Every structure is written in C-alpha cells, then in structure tokens.
Amino acid sequence: MSGKRLYLDPPHLLVSFYPETSESLVFLSVCEVAERKGCVPSGIVEISSRDTRFELLSDLGAEKVQKDISSAHQSEFIKTAVDGGRRVVRSGYVHNVFGKVVIEYQPAPLSEMHPICLSVSAGALGIPDDLRDSADRREARDMGRWARELLEGVGRTGAVGYGMIDLEVPLPTPSQIKEASQDLPTEAFISRNLLDRRPAMRSELAHLFRPSEIFEFDFGMITQGWLSGGSHSRQSQIVESKARGVSRILGGVL
C-alpha cells in the first residue's frame, strides 16, 4: 500500500455493518469476506487497547498505533489480538481492480457499539451519471455489484443486525435511527433476527420496493436502490422517501 498509509482518495464508497453482539466478531467477519471477494492483506493495521472506549478513532490519539506486519499473517493477527488485550481498529487491503481498501471502526456514541465498515475510493460511482463515459459506467456497475456481494456475504455470517452501502455517510447506530437523525440508504441489509422481532416488517418493506429490488434469504433481507440508478439517484425524492421508510420500519425494532 503506497506510502504505508491507510489513506483513500475521496469520495468513499462505504459498505457498513452494525454488530449483533460483538464489534470484534463483525470486524473479523468483514475482513474474511473481503479476502474472499478479492482483497489482499497489505500488511498494515492500526491497533489500540481492547477496553478503551471512544466515539471517533481520532479520540484514541497516541493509543492508536500503526503496525507493519507480514501480510501472510494479517488475518491471524486480527483473530488473536483480542487475546492479548488489544484490538485491530483499522486494517489495510488491496483489490486488484478497485485499489486500496480499509476496514475500520466507524463513529458511535460511547453507549453503543461501533459500526464496522469497508471503505474504498468510489471511483466512477462518485461521478454523476451524466458525466460518465462508457468506461466509467462499466466501472460503476462492477463496483456496485462487488459492494452488493460484500453486503450479502457479511450478512450471511449472522454476526450483524443491519448494514448498508452508501457514499461517505457512516452507518447510523440504533439510537440515531430511532431518533430519526439519519436515514438508512436504499441499499440495505436487515438480519433475520431483527425481522423476526416483528414479522410485519417483511410486508412493510415489500410495500416500499418493487419485487426486483427486495430479496429475502434465510439469514435476512436485502433491499436494492440507488446503485441501480446511479449516484444522482441517491438524492431523488423517490429514493429519499424509501430511505425514510426503511429507517422508520427498522427503528421500530431496535
């Protein structure tokens, strides 16, 4: 990874997940799925004490240390760090098509767990549709498909309650969703565990989306939206209305 830095050029595409019970388990799950989807460990991680609470990663200050390790042993290091009283809070990878990838803790109030996200430079997905050429459209389509595969792959692990794909916007925590201070995007995952808390959620979500935009599996439900319509569609009235609906429905069970 160039310059041994965990830095990505903006704007960022984020594939983010909120834990069911354990931040470290979700972090490991995202790392493992990312490797199955073509991400190669870069040999760079950032670590901190396992028990230190924080809202932003920057709050850790000097306690957050960047460490160079063998890329061949990066996965094992992430697994065993907790046993040594530490935790990996950022981990670097490289994808042969999409470039540098970072998996990291997102902001959260001290009273809640942190979402975990995979970040990558958005490339063509960050370009308005009417400015994309044919190569940009192909890149945007390929990156969108890859992001959806990541969302589904981590959802299948059973470690996460909900997740999303968005540009630049961190995943809201349960309190932020319930307070309606931030909506989920239309590219979302909701676990079976949450769906089973109120079975009517299934029909309410189905009412918001066309049959081609919503998929139910034994591990949960996935909705699709703005990636199909391009970056400009994230701000369309229809998409914003669906996003508010998803957040309202999910907020009722968190």
Image (cartoon, helix red, strand yellow):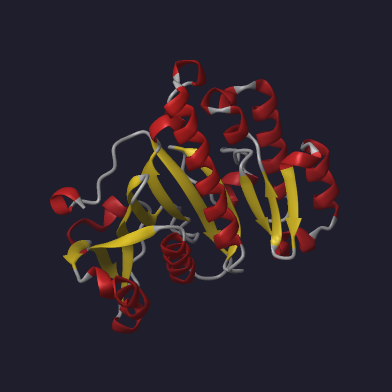
Left or right, 230 with reference to 8: right
User: Residue 205, how many percent across, how many down?
Assistant: 78, 44
Q: Is residue 39 above or below residue 159?
A: above
Q: Residue at x 60, y 56 (%)?
A: 152
In this rendering, position of residue 111 left or right of residue 98: right
Which residue is at the front of the view, 228 or 201?
228
The answer, for residue 172, to whether it is visible in the render is: no
Q: From the top left corner, tell me how far across and down residue 239 is, in percent.
A: 66, 29
| Camera sees residue 129 | yes
> Residue 28 vs residue 202: left or right?
left
Asked if 44 appears above or below 179 in the picture, the reply is below
The residue shown at (19%, 70%) is 69
Describe residue 177's horizontal placement relative to residue 77 as left or right.
right
* Residue toward you, 153 or 180: 153
Q: Which residue is found at the position 77% from the left and 37% from the top? A: 209
Q: Residue furthest left?
A: 3
